[in-house]
Image: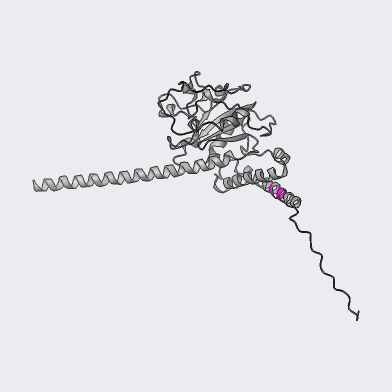
C-alpha cells in the first residue's frame, strides 16, 4: 500500500507539473500573439496615413479598422486625385462603438441600429472572378463578423473600385479582411444574406499570418492582385503624376511618408515576390522626387547659403 501511495503521489505531481508547463506555454503564446497583433495595428496605422498609390487608397477608420479602396480595372486610372468621399470622412468620426472590439459575436447583424445613409453605390460590374471565396459554411470563421456590418457601411467606393475592410480586432487576435462592396464580382456568395456577406475572405496571407512573418503589405498586395484587372506587376506602384501635382510642402510630406513605408518593405518584405524588384525601382524614383522637393523647399525658405567668394589679397607696394 505504501508503494502504491508513492506511485499515486508521483503521478499527481507529474500531472501538476505538466499542467503548469502547459499553462505557461499557453500564456507565452497568447503574449506573442498579442504582441504580433499590436505590430500589425502599427503597420495598419502607418498605411492609413499614406496616399499616392496607383491601384489602391487606404483610409484609417479607428484603431482597429482600415478601409481599402482598390481599382477594379486598370484603364489608365490615376490614384487619389480622388479625395476620400464625404461618407468615408464622416465614418471616421463615428463613435467608438462602431470600431471597438467589444461588438458581440452573438449580436444579430440585423438588429436595430441608428439609421445610416444609403449603402455604397455599385460600380459597373466586370467579369466575375471567383478565385477567392469566403470560408465554407460550417467553418468557425463563418461567424467572425466585423464590428460594422456590410449592409450598414456608409463609405462610398469610387467608380471602378471595390471597397474592402481590413481589421485587426483584439477579440479575434488576428487580422481579417471583408468585402464591403461589389461582393458578386469577387465571390460566389450564393445569396444576399448579411451573415454571408460579412464572412471574412479566405486569403493566403491571412491564413499564413499565424505561422509566418506576414505583414500588412502582404494582405494588401494579395487584395490588389485579386481585384484589379489585369493583375498589376507592382501592386505598390505610385502615381508619380499625382505626387508631382501636390503643393510643395504637401509633396515633401507625402513623398517622405511613402518613402518610409516602401523602404520598410524593402528591408522586411519577401524578396521572392515577383514585384519586389519593381518596388526597388519605385523607391529609387521616389527618393529622387523627395530629395528634389526638399531642395526646392530649402530654396524657398532661403536656407541655402550663397557660395562664399574667396577673398582676394590686395596687392602689396612691392608689386
* The C terminus - image quarter: bottom right
The image quarter in which residue 51 lies: top right
Between 102 and 33, the residue placed more toward the observer is: 102
Residues shaded magenta: 290-294
Residue that extends furthest to the left in the rendered view of this protein: 1
**Which residue is painted at 22% across and 46% down in the image?**
14
In the image: residue 19, left or right of residue 181? left
Query: Could you tell me if residue 112 is visible in this image?
Result: yes
- Which of the 4 image quarters holds residue 158? top right
Across and down, in percent, residue 12 comes to 20, 44
The residue positioned 66% from the left and 34% from the top of the image is 80
Of residues 46 and 7, which is closer to you in this image? 46
Q: Residue furthest top?
A: 191
- Residue 241 pos. (x, y %): 72, 38
Residue 273, horizontal then vertical, whole percent: 57, 41
In the image: residue 6, left or right of residue 161: left
Q: Is residue 101 magenta?
A: no
- The secondary structure making up most of the magenta span is helix
Amino acid at each position: 500500500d505504501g508503494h502504491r501511495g508513492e506511485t499515486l503521489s508521483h503521478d499527481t505531481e507529474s500531472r501538476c507539473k505538466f499542467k503548469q508547463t502547459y499553462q505557461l506555454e499557453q500564456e507565452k503564446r497568447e503574449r506573442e500573439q498579442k504582441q504580433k497583433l499590436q505590430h500589425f495595428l502599427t503597420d495598419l496605422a502607418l498605411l492609413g496615413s499614406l496616399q499616392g498609390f496607383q491601384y489602391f487608397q487606404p483610409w484609417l477608420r479607428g484603431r482597429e479598422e482600415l478601409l481599402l479602396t482598390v481599382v477594379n480595372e486598370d484603364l489608365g486610372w490615376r490614384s487619389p486625385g480622388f479625395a476620400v468621399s464625404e461618407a468615408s470622412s464622416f465614418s471616421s468620426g463615428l463613435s467608438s462603438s462602431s470600431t471597438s472590439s467589444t461588438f458581440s459575436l452573438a449580436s444579430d447583424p440585423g438588429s436595430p441600429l441608428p439609421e445610416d445613409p444609403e449603402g455604397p453605390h455599385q460600380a459597373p460590374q466586370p467579369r466575375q472572378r471567383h478565385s477567392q471565396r469566403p470560408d465554407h459554411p460550417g467553418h468557425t470563421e463563418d461567424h467572425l463578423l466585423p464590428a460594422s456590418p456590410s449592409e450598414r457601411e456608409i463609405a462610398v467606393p469610387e467608380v471602378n473600385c471595390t471597397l474592402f475592410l481590413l481589421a485587426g480586432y483584439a477579440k479575434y487576435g488576428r487580422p481579417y479582411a471583408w468585402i464591403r462592396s461589389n461582393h458578386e464580382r469577387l465571390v460566389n456568395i450564393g445569396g444576399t444574406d448579411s451573415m454571408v456577406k460579412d464572412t471574412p475572405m479566405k486569403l493566403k496571407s491571412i491564413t499564413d499570418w499565424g505561422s509566418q512573418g506576414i505583414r500588412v503589405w502582404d494582405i494588401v498586395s494579395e487584395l490588389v492582385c485579386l481585384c484589379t484587372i489585369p493583375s498589376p506587376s507592382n501592386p505598390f506602384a505610385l502615381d508619380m503624376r499625382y505626387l508631382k501635382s501636390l503643393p510643395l510642402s504637401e509633396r515633401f510630406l507625402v513623398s517622405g511618408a511613402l518613402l518610409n513605408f516602401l523602404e520598410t518593405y524593402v528591408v522586411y518584405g519577401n524578396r521572392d515576390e515577383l514585384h519586389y524588384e519593381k518596388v526597388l525601382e519605385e523607391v529609387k524614383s521616389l527618393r529622387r522626387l523627395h530629395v528634389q522637393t526638399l531642395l526646392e523647399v530649402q530654396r524657398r525658405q532661403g536656407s541655402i547659403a550663397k557660395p562664399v567668394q574667396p577673398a582676394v589679397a590686395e596687392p602689396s607696394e612691392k608689386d
